[in-house]
Image (cartoon, rainbow, N blue to C red):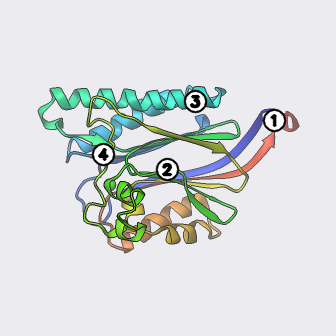
């Protein structure tokens, strides 16, 4: 049986307090259920090109997902990230000032009552469900690998000097291996996509506390960015919040 999902969403990027430019990019196409956050690197005139390219290429492909099976949807997301990687990597080879550029990408698509998230790097997707905040994605980062191997605790990882070193990146190499996550949407779910300018400044506890409060999605976005800036705003901050307002049987609405 098909179901109709109703949701509201809001997103914004902010330069933060310390940086002169913003290398993050994001895009929301609510009609297609497509959302993406990308955090570019490589310095000015390179990082912002990489993140913008990833957002454009991946969002174009994700609009083909609607109505597809989970397996097809996952393959479309994976391929879109591989394609973005190839396009960005090509420019790093031929354009002197783009050498070393790359980007993270966390891309979510809503397909019926299902969602899928494609992941490269250390931007993150979370869901607040039934009062619990769950991190959907796993960072591709040096400190995450150290945590997995048992060498660092999560708390040590947060404050580690290499905490911003990522181990997978869109555009840095000839190939990339994205992770894809999927699940079912529940009424009341609040999804958060964010660059590390948010998650590096706020702990999961703080995200949970803000997202549990009684606010609109726009107010969630503003509150999260304001709090990251209040704590120093060391990096560009990008936030998308999607709230699932209802999951309805299609037949009952026709
Ligand atoms: Ca960043």
Query: Who comes first in sequence, dot 2 or dot 3?
Result: 3
- Report the residue marked by disc 2: 137
Query: Total number of numbered labels?
Result: 4
- Report the residue marked by disc 1: 250
As displayed, is residue 213 above or below residue 83? below
Residue at image position (61%, 36%) is 31
Query: Who comes first in sequence, dot 2 or dot 1?
Result: 2
Percent from the top left, x then y, of residue 62?
52, 31
Element at label 3: helix
- Separation of marks 2 and 1 at Cα, in angstroms: 30 Å
* Circles 4 and 2 in contact, beta carbons < 8 Å: no
Q: For the C terminus, give its image quadrant.
A: top right
Element at label 1: helix
- Report the residue marked by disc 3: 73
Q: Quadrant of residue 209?
A: bottom right
Query: Who comes first in sequence, dot 3 or dot 4?
Result: 4
Disc 3 crowd rating (10 Å Cα; few below 14, some 14-19, many 20+) is many
Percent from the top left, x then y, of residue 166?
31, 50
Disc 2 crowd rating (10 Å Cα; few below 14, some 14-19, many 20+) is many
Of the two numbered discs 2 and 1 in the rendering, the one whose residue sits closer to the viewer: 2
Of the two numbered discs 3 and 1 in the rendering, the one whose residue sits closer to the viewer: 3
- Separation of marks 4 and 2 at Cα, in angstroms: 18 Å
- Report the residue marked by disc 4: 40
Query: Who comes first in sequence, dot 3 or dot 1?
Result: 3
Q: For the N terminus, give its image quadrant.
A: top right
- Separation of marks 2 and 3 at Cα, in angstroms: 17 Å
Percent from the top left, x then y, of residue 66?
63, 29
Query: In the displayed image of the protein, which residue is found farthest to the bottom?
Result: 230
User: Any atom of ligand 1 within 8 Å of the CB at mark 3?
Assistant: no
As displayed, is residue 86 above or below residue 112? above
């Amino acid at each position: 049986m098909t179901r109709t999902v109703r949701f509201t969403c809001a997103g914004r990027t902010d330069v933060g307090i310390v940086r002169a430019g913003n290398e993050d990019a994001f895009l929301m196409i609510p009609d297609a259920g497509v959302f993406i956050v990308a955090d570019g690197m490589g310095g000015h005139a390179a990082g912002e090109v990489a993140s913008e390219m990833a957002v454009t290429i991946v969002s174009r492909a994700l609009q083909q997902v609607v109505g597809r099976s989970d397996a097809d949807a996952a393959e479309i997301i994976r391929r879109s990230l591989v394609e973005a990687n190839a396009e960005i990597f090509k420019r790093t080879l031929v354009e002197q000032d783009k050498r070393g550029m790359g980007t993270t990408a966390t891309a979510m698509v809503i397909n019926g009552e299902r969602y899928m998230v494609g992941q490269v790097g250390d931007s993150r997707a979370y869901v607040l469900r039934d009062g619990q905040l769950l991190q959907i994605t796993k960072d591709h980062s040096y400190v995450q690998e150290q945590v997995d191997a048992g060498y660092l605790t999560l708390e040590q990882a947060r404050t580690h000097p290499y905490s911003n070193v990522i181990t997978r990146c869109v555009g840095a190499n000839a190939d990339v291996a994205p992770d894809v996550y999927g699940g079912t949407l529940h009424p009341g779910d609040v999804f958060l996509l964010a660059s590390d300018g948010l998650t590096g400044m706020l702990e999961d506890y703080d995200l949970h506390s803000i997202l549990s409060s009684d606010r609109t999605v726009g107010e969630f976005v503003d509150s999260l960015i304001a709090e990251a800036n209040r704590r120093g705003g060391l990096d560009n901050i990008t936030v998308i919040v999607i709230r699932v307002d209802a999951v309805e049987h299609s037949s009952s609405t026709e």
